[in-house]
Amino acid sequence: MAYTFVLIHGSWHDNRAWKPVIDRLEQNGHRAYAPTVAGHTATDKKDISHAECVQSVVDFIKTSDLHDFVLVGHSFGGTVIQAVAEHVPDRIRRLVFWNAFVLLDGQSLEDNIPPHYRELFAQLKQPDGGVMLPYPVWRDAFIGDADDVLAREAYSTLSPTPSRSHNDKVPLKTFYSLPIPKSYLNCTEDIALPPGPEWGWHPRMSSRLGLYRLVQMPGSHEVIFTNPHLLADKLVEAGRD
């Protein structure tokens, strides 16, 4: 069966990262769309709220007249698709959280990261409101399964992310009552968050979804660069009926 996917990137990324994944999905008969979230291109203003990030995706969905799609969120993108689901629940076939944050009502992304990351990002915040991920953190914690050439090439596509999108408290008054099916895709070598019950992705984030499908694959937080074809195949597995 063919599916339609809407793919939401994480912090520091834009929609270009999804191209190899989209190519693979389309080769296998699916349709896929990847909007860039507000504030996430190199030329965008960085004083962008979480609500503005969400609204940019809602606007894309409505303008593109998309229905019956699988909505995928990676990392920060998980917080976006939670709020998008409250806006357009009847259009979404399934939600897929790929090593993504799953917020509780009234939480921010920053509430869910370790203190050392909070301190680092506070120190790195730029006057325009952006914050950039340092290369050493990217290299070891985010994309450890890449060689140096690929790691640097991928890093060159990143740009500062709006710090407000991490700090804003996100109201999720109806998300946990929505009947939309949910899946969690977990990369087993992802150490962008320290592994373990206190800060790790799974099961800390995934267990918040209630009833959900678990799909796993090998790789780091950035298999979008290191293994995009397997990622695409696993998104189909996570998104299927």
Image (spheres, helix red, strand yellow):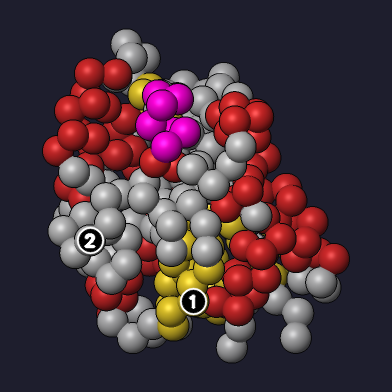
Q: Amino acid at mark 1?
A: Val
Mark on residue 196? 2
Mark on residue 130? none
When asked about the image quadrant of residue 89, the answer is bottom left
Marks 1/2: CA–CA distance: 18 Å
Q: Nearer the viewer, mark 1 or mark 2?
A: 2
Left or right of 101? Residue 112 is left
Residue 172 lies, in percent from the top left, at 26, 62
When asked about the image quadrant of residue 149, the answer is top right
Residue position for label 1:
215
Q: Is residue 60 above or below residue 49?
A: below
Earlier in the chain: of badge 1 and badge 2, it is 2
Q: Amino acid at mark 2?
A: Gly
Outermost residue, front side: 147
Residue at the (29%, 18%) spot, across then down: 124
Q: Is residue 171 above or below residue 93?
A: above
Name the foreground residue: 129 vs 205.
205
Question: Quarter holding the C terminus?
Answer: bottom right
Left or right of 44? Residue 50 is left
| Whether residue 180 can be seen here | no
Dot 1 lies on which element?
A: strand
Left or right of 221? Residue 86 is left
Residue at the (50%, 42%) spot, across then down: 143
Residue at the (30%, 33%) spot, across then down: 164
Residue 69 lies, in percent from the top left, at 62, 72
| Whether residue 155 can be seen here | yes
Specify the segment rendered in magenta.
Answer: 134-140
Q: Is residue 92 above or below residue 99?
A: below
Find out whether residue 135 is within the magenta segment: yes
